[in-house]
Image (cartoon, rainbow, N blue to C red):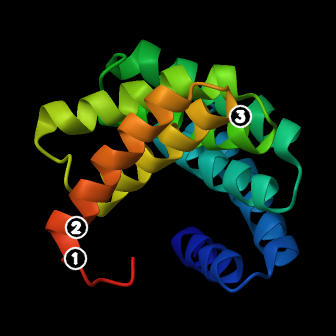
Amino acid sequence: TLMLTAEQANLYARVGRLGEAQGLQEEIVRVRRESLGPDHAATWAALADLAATLRALGRVERAIEIQEPLRRNWVAKRGESSLEALVAGEDLATSYLAAGRFGEAVPLQESYVRAMWASGSARMPRALDAVMRTARSYAALGDGRRAVELGRVAYEGYKQQFGRDSLL
């Protein structure tokens, strides 16, 4: 039933019932810690879901408190360039952005974008979205040249992927 509880929590989060999602996610974290231990990948996944919900609820600093050690854990377990570490870094960057911590977000964003480029996934929508978020971070930091340069890369990628007349 824990998997079904996780699915229900994800549904609540998707439809904006964030308080209910948070309650279920906290229960999932508790059960996974007790049954699998604090250093198990499934426990970390549950923590990542909880952090995303907390960020959506505006509890950004609490989300960051969860996400920073999660990223360190993935880096220690699988390496800096592992998909898990990169996604944890991208999630942490999103929270840093929400907290106005652009300088901390940019290196994580750039790592994710470079990895997507190196893997050949650069034209996937998630990668293009990451490029555009990185461009916005540079704009917030006052680096207009880099912001426009990355924005152009994302724009050209969207055009190639979806066509010139796409509503994206």
User: What amino acid does circle 3 point to?
Assistant: Tyr
Question: The residue tagged with tag 3: helix, strand or loop?
Answer: helix
Give the quarter of the figure containing the C terminus.
bottom left
- Residue 52 lies, in percent from the top left, at 68, 54
Q: CA distance from mark 1 to mark 3?
A: 32 Å
Dot 3 alpha-carbon crowd within 10 angstroms: few under 14, some 14 to 19, many 20 or more: many
Vertical position of residue 23 compared to residue 63: above or below:
below
Query: Which of labels 3 and 2 is toward the front?
Result: 2
Question: The residue tagged with tag 1: helix, strand or loop?
Answer: loop
User: What amino acid does circle 2 point to?
Assistant: Lys
Whether residues under marks 2 and 1 lie with C-beta atoms below 8 angstroms apart, the answer is yes
Question: The residue tagged with tag 2: helix, strand or loop?
Answer: helix
Residue on which disc 3 sits = 96
* Left or right of 2 in this view: 16: right
Residue on which disc 1 sits = 164
- Residue 24 lies, in percent from the top left, at 76, 69
Give the quarter of the figure containing the N terminus.
bottom right
Which disc, if any, is residue 159? 2
- Residue 138 lies, in percent from the top left, at 57, 31
Residue visible at 87% across and 72% down in the picture: 19
Decide which of 162, 60 is in the foreground and name it: 162
Q: Quadrant of residue 4?
A: bottom right
Residue visible at 76% across and 72% down in the picture: 21
Question: Residue pushed farthest left?
Answer: 120
* Left or right of 89 in this view: 99: right
Of mark 1 and mark 3, the one earlier in the sequence is 3
User: What amino acid does circle 1 point to?
Assistant: Arg
Residue visible at 49% across and 36% down in the picture: 147
